[in-house]
Amino acid sequence: EGRFRDEERLKAALIEFQIEHTNNQFCERVLPSTSQMRSAGRTDLLSALDRYGGTEAVAGRLKMMSSRHYSYHAEFLNFLRELRGYLRESGQEGVMPSMIQLEREGRHDIKKLITKHGGMRVMAARLDLTLSRGRTDLVWGPFDLDFAIEVLEYAHMLALDVEGGDEIRMPTMKELTSFGRMDLDELVVQYGGYPEVGRRLGLDC
């Protein structure tokens, strides 16, 4: 415990662990997961985290993200990329594939993530995709899959900054325009504003 008598020393040890055990550009911004540390026998890190108030509390003070928070958002972005690729390859852009179709074509990964993130009707509404079978009474308004992916990519890029805080969040108007993306800012307004777009993408403002 003497090794981690202050949180900065603990942070350095956590980052060192991530660099050693992960091949990820976010390794200096994300706390290792409990299972990672336990598997590596790093009970010293686990004990220190508990002593300083637990993973979430330490993440907030150190301006790092918890593994759970990062994993959720990284998985969602990857899911949207995979879904877009699948729709392009199958020639059905703008249409949510059916579970039967995904099962038949062996895309169990996409099927599983659709279910995890709310199901077919909810995901179709969130992304403004037409259901391939039947109609839905669940309508969230206009949206665009390419736009969603771009906003999420900027959110991840901003989170890489050492001062990015302890979460992946919705970019602000100032941030998007500073990147020269006035087009994205205009689309955010068109799609209901920053809080609404953030809600559809699972991002806090």
Image (cartoon, helix red, strand yellow):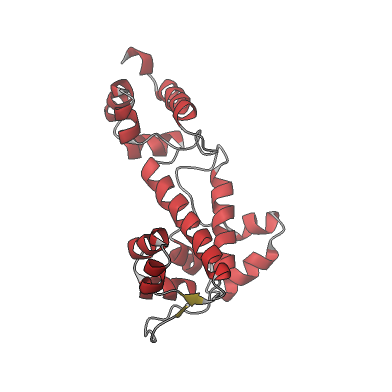
Q: Position of residue 183 (x, y in %)?
A: 68, 67
* Vertical placement of residue 50 versus 199, above or below: above
Task: Give whichever of 64, 46 is nearer the camera.
Answer: 46
Quarter where residue 50 is shown: top left
Task: Give whichever of 120, 70 is nearer the camera.
Answer: 120
Looking at the rendered structure, the number of numbered marks drawn on it comes to 0
Q: Is residue 183 left or right of residue 103?
A: right
Residue that sits furthest to the right in the current view: 180
* Vertical placement of residue 169 versus 51, above or below: below
Task: Give whichever of 55, 100 is nearer the camera.
Answer: 100
**Residue sitting at x 59%, y 54%:** 154
Residue 107 makes an appearance in the image:
yes
Q: Is residue 187 left or right of residue 39?
A: right
Task: Give whichever of 63, 201 is nearer the camera.
Answer: 201
Residue 128 makes an appearance in the image:
no
* Vertical placement of residue 5 versus 123, above or below: above
Residue that sits furthest to the top in the current view: 2
**Residue sitting at x 72%, y 58%:** 180
Q: Position of residue 159 (x, y in %)?
A: 53, 45
Split into 4 quadrants, where in the image is the N terminus?
top left
Q: Position of residue 22 (x, y in %)?
A: 47, 33
**Residue sitting at x 38%, y 64%:** 111
Quarter where residue 148 is shown: bottom right
**Residue sitting at x 59%, y 66%:** 146
